[in-house]
Image (tube, grey):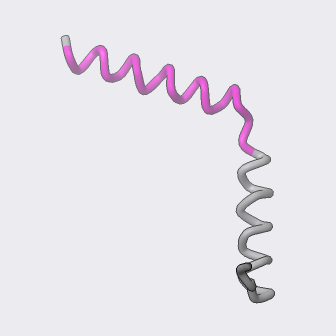
Amino acid sequence: MVTLSDDEVALIRSILIALRAIKVRDIDKALVALSQGDRRESE
């Protein structure tokens, strides 16, 4: 079992809240933009 300090718990909680705020559609749009950029560079 792992024991976490109060600071570590607060940090993990803030990271999880930030990740929850990221929308899946935004991630998909970013991946599409990156893949299009890769195609342009390879041509």
Assign the magenta stretch its main secondary structure: helix
Looking at the image, which is closer to me, 37 or 16?
16
- 26 lies above or below 16: above
- 24 lies above or below 8: above
In the image, residue 17 lies at what x, y percent?
80, 57
In the image, residue 6 lies at what x, y percent?
80, 87
In the image: residue 7, left or right of residue 30:
right
Residue at 59% across, 24% down: 29
Magenta segment? 22-42
Residue at 74% across, 84% down: 4
Point out the image quarter for the N terminus.
bottom right
Residue at 74% across, 85% down: 3
- 40 lies above or below 21: above
Q: How many marks?
A: 0
In the image, residue 39 lies at what x, y percent?
30, 15
Looking at the image, which is closer to me, 13 or 36?
13
The image quarter containing residue 2 is: bottom right
